[in-house]
């Protein structure tokens, strides 16, 4: 698949950081930045810009806050054309500040929101847009939204200055036919000057397949992470996506190299990937929190019991 | 997805046996048989019926040969409606014998073949059909066949007494649009009284997604294995497939239970799953043999080097 408009964003640090409270070493982040730059990727997401009041620095690493100076420090001296993004939660904005774009190393601000917080998200988009940033709205948990609410949100987004609106399969619950439906719904309701993006979770080993499905139906912004790192089952594997896309600017070797050198040792320390309790929350269209909790107990491999319990909860 | 005609076959022992030369204990096979029976599965594949001349018994376990008596021994005393299948390689038939179906515990014989061996496969189908068995032909490595050869083979198959013809993505190379094309091609060329099946490998984490794609386009016979066990990246995960299919006869809990009790301990001993060298052979549409070989060396995690080497080979 080659379509010039397709932009690939790596969310290794941001989504991967949900497993380790964003405690990545500077060296690690620097190596990822180098590799993604060498592979010709379009965007690297450096983490969240979260409030230090809501998330106290005693408990989290630097990539929970993504201060401009910190980003400059790790990227300094590396030759790169990659654009940088950060994510902000619409429902957790407090004292965070944003410099005008030309005084910041950041190019794009991605606003994560639930449908119910759409007004907050749009207010934040306007603020960031006025400062000169590219903006996205990542609509989370849409597999639990009913159509009229989602459509109302899309119609609001169509009228605001956001550049890209993402289909986010937060629970890893969507099948390809549902992805097709949602991407087409987004395309229909958003004005022609906005792009559709897709961000998938891998609970059912469908993150990559659903990302392709999104691309087929004209989603032009696609997310992946190295070796699929991310909370629980993780995300669409960036290496698969780059293996699929035929855009000549992308190179697979730097990605494979940084996986063998940085991600493989990390996965021996932290768990992510195809793990059955997350598969269960995925097929039941539930938040992964119950799976995260049971994986910390000595019952962590009692898959059948967990499924029976969750069916009761879901019912 | 619910369609009464859909039949699910488990190939845990047969395809999984390619990792351990079919040395599964009787106890293991018995537990799998119990679990699949309790889950309402349609077919369980017990292994290969291979020639003892070509595969000497000193090197292989019982499930490389699947003698009728051996099958009776492990299934004895377990209440079950599941049908049993075995696989035979069309190009490796020597002294193997088949009893008439009413004297055998086996219901279905699946003939694996390359397009070039289609005449041998059809001869074997006729022999098995005349003995009363259900038959399938599993056309391997079709991602490397050119259309006229494949179409000729399908036209031959349309005229023979085979019941099901399988799309087999031997190299885990196919994308969903290619699966759609192939399943439709099969359906078009096979007569109306034959079914299309699909068997996928998981090199690119697409085995399950491609199996769904096959189902959407009317493949009614689908293969999975417990926890995806199989050579290299393995197969479509049976637990995902059963989570997806809405046929009320299927039950997920017995499958999850046997995975936690039998498959999880086994995966701590033997390697299968998402492993990057197999991803590389998948995206390059190559046989996994080079990946299998490099995984046995101390260079087993040199993904980038392997990719560069394989690109030269493939070119």
Image (spheres, coloured by chain):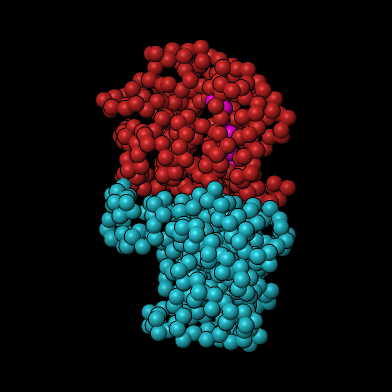
Chain colours: A cyan, B red
User: Where does the magenta region start and end?
Assistant: B164-171
Find residue B120 and report its horizontal and vertical position in percent: 61, 20
Whether A91 is drawn above or below A3: the answer is below
Q: How many marks?
A: 0
Q: Residue at x 62, y 59 (%)?
A: A187
Answer with left or right where residue B152 lies relative to residue B38: right
Find residue B86 and report its horizontal and vertical position in percent: 46, 26
Quarter holding residue B142: top right
Q: Is residue A53 visible in the rendered structure shown here?
A: yes
Q: Residue at x 69, y 74 (%)?
A: A81
Find residue A65 and report its horizontal and vertical position in percent: 48, 80
Residue nearest the observer in this picture, B135 or A78: B135
Residue nearest the observer in this picture, A185 or B235: A185
Whether A229 is drawn above or below A203: the answer is below
Q: Is B87 covered by the magenta stretch?
A: no
Answer with left or right where residue A23 lies relative to residue B161: left
Q: Is B170 covered by the magenta stretch?
A: yes
Residue nearest the observer in this picture, B105 or B48: B105
Answer with left or right where residue B228 lies relative to residue B150: left
Q: Residue at x 49, y 42 (%)?
A: B236
Main SS, magenta region, reads: strand
Whether B172 is drawn above or below B73: the answer is below
């Amino acid at each position: 698949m080659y379509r010039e408009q397709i932009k690939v964003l790596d969310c290794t640090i941001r989504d991967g950081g949900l497993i380790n409270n964003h405690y990545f070493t500077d060296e690690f982040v620097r190596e990822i930045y180098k590799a993604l730059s060498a592979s010709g990727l379009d965007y690297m997401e450096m983490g969240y810009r979260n409030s230090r009041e809501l998330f106290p620095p005693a408990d989290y690493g630097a990539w929970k806050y993504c201060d401009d100076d910190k980003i400059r420090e790790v990227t300094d001296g590396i030759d790169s054309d990659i654009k940088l993004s950060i994510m902000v939660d619409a429902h957790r904005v407090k004292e965070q500040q944003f410099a005008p774009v030309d005084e910041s190393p950041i190019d794009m601000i991605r606003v994560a929101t639930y449908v119910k917080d759409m007004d907050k998200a749009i207010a934040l988009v306007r603020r960031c847009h006025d400062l000169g940033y590219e903006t996205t709205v990542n609509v989370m948990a849409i597999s639990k939204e009913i159509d009229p609410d989602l459509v109302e949100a899309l119609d609001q987004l169509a009228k605001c200055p956001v550049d890209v609106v993402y289909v986010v399969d937060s629970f890893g619950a969507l099948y390809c036919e549902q992805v097709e439906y949602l991407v087409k719904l987004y395309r229909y309701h958003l004005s022609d000057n906005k792009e559709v993006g897709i961000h998938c979770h891998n609970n059912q080993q469908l993150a990559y397949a659903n990302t392709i499905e999104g691309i087929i139906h004209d989603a032009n912004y696609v997310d992946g992470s190295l070796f699929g790192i991310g909370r629980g089952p993780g995300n669409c594997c960036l290496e698969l996506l780059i293996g699929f896309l035929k855009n000549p600017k992308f190179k697979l070797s730097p990605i494979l190299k940084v996986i063998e050198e940085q991600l493989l040792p990390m996965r021996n320390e932290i768990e992510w990937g195809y793990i059955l309790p997350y598969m269960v929350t995925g097929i039941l269209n539930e938040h992964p929190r119950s799976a995260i909790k049971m994986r910390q107990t000595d019952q962590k491999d009692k898959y059948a019991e967990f499924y029976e319990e969750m069916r009761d909860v879901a019912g």
